[in-house]
Amino acid sequence: MAGRTGSTPSATRARRLHKSVHRVRTQLRRSGVDYFRGHGSDWVVLTALLLSVPALAWATLSQPIWAAPEALVLPLIAGGLLLRPFSMTLVYAAAAAALTVEALVLGHYGAGAGRVTPGTVLVVFAVGLVGLLIAQFRMRVGVPWTGGGTMLFDLRERLRVQSKLPPLPKGWHREMSLRPAGGQSFSGDFVVAARTGPNRRTLEVVLTDVSGKGMDAGSRALLLSGAFGGLLGSLAPHSFLPAANAYLLRQDWEEGFATSVHLVLDLDSGDYELFSAGHLPALQLCGGSGKWEQKEADGALLGVYEGVEFHPAKGRLDRGDVLMLFTDGLVETSDRELAEGMDRLSGAAEGYVATRFRGAAWHLIEKVAKDVNDDRALLLITRS
């Protein structure tokens, strides 16, 4: 009983210490999250910028030739990138007061160089106004200036990772290339893929073309790639496109339609089913005859009609065969018909038969649609 009583204060102190440490860690984590979202305290930056204003004013009064009055725009630029709008107004007021003191002490601008001129006042005023607008925009978005680029980079990397194709067993080769419109980092075309079925001997690949292009379609492509990735493998193959169509309809986007093609390939036999939602036909090279065949399935666009049925086209990849899936940016332009573009693509692909299409996806886009202002995607699956 005495031993139990003697250990109680020690255990209590340990619990209190543990709670204190946990409270501090939680507070630090919340502060970090708040700062990243643009809601954290900015008093440290505000203090530093407010102190820099009189320092710059003193430098201007001491050496007006080397420290020009226009140097006051530096804290205004930094404030626009780092401070809240209210804090930015304090720096703005401090800069205006410092500029007034400089004008009074240095004298009339006609007396020589290094004086405060009307142009100086206009420059400082304009930069301060722009900084205030930037601060207001950041608060509205809720992302600090250092986090905006990081967020965009993270979104781009997520799209890239989600579009990776799983490794295939010996005898199969797959490769893919995505090219956004206008050299941007975001594309409305994306791919999700997974190995499913017993012993993961079935390859399911979904190639989707979201309406729009580049940055306009990038955010919707990111949302849909995550949703489609969750659906793929969780549903039977014939249920995937109906579920994807229902998902798009629930979003109620003004420009929310998409085309999609869903390949279900048996990696043991080579048999496949191709489901299409308003997508372009696939092209299959038959190794025995050396001819390209179109594989086209029936199905309406995603996100337009309810209760749409999707009927697959069936085929088989024998040894030496190649299957190409692609989006319309690769074969269709304003001055080129679809049939002509597909003939051009299959003709360019003939040059890669000898190399078994190793590294062909990127080069094919370069050959047939290098300067096209549209998102382009090409997926190749070969059986050696």
Image (tube, rainbow, N blue to C red):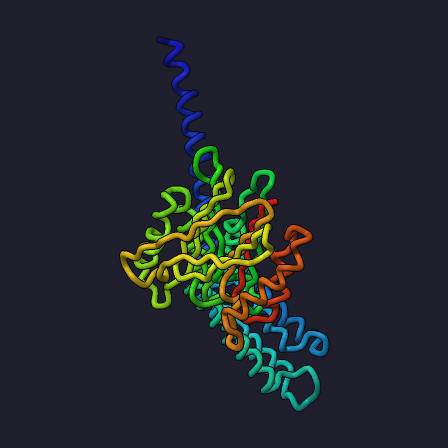
Q: Quadrant of the N terminus?
A: top left
Quick one: 138 or 349, which is closer to the camera?
349
Which residue sits at x=56%, y=83%?
122
Q: Is residue 293 above or below residue 125?
A: above
Would you say 50 lies left or right of 229 here?
Answer: right
Q: Quadrant of residue 39?
A: bottom left
Quick one: 207 or 4, which is closer to the camera?
207
Q: Is residue 105 above or below residue 169?
A: below
Quick one: 296 or 18, which is closer to the camera?
296
- The reply to whether residue 196 is in sight is yes
Which residue sits at x=50%, y=40%?
269
Residue situated furthest left in the rendering: 307
- The reply to whether residue 146 is in sight is no
Residue situated furthest bottom in the rendering: 110
Which residue sits at x=72%, y=78%?
65
Residue 68 at what x, y percent from top left?
67, 77
Q: Quadrant of the C terminus?
A: top right
For the image, the number of numbered tags is 0
Which residue sits at x=57%, y=57%?
291
Would you say 321 lies left or right of 31 here?
Answer: right
Quick one: 173 or 51, which is closer to the camera?
173
Q: Quadrant of residue 365?
A: bottom right
Residue 222 at what x, y percent from top left?
45, 56
Q: Is residue 290 above or below residue 193?
A: below
Residue situated furthest front in the rendering: 289
Residue 347 at what x, y percent from top left?
61, 64
Q: Is residue 124 above or below residue 360?
A: below
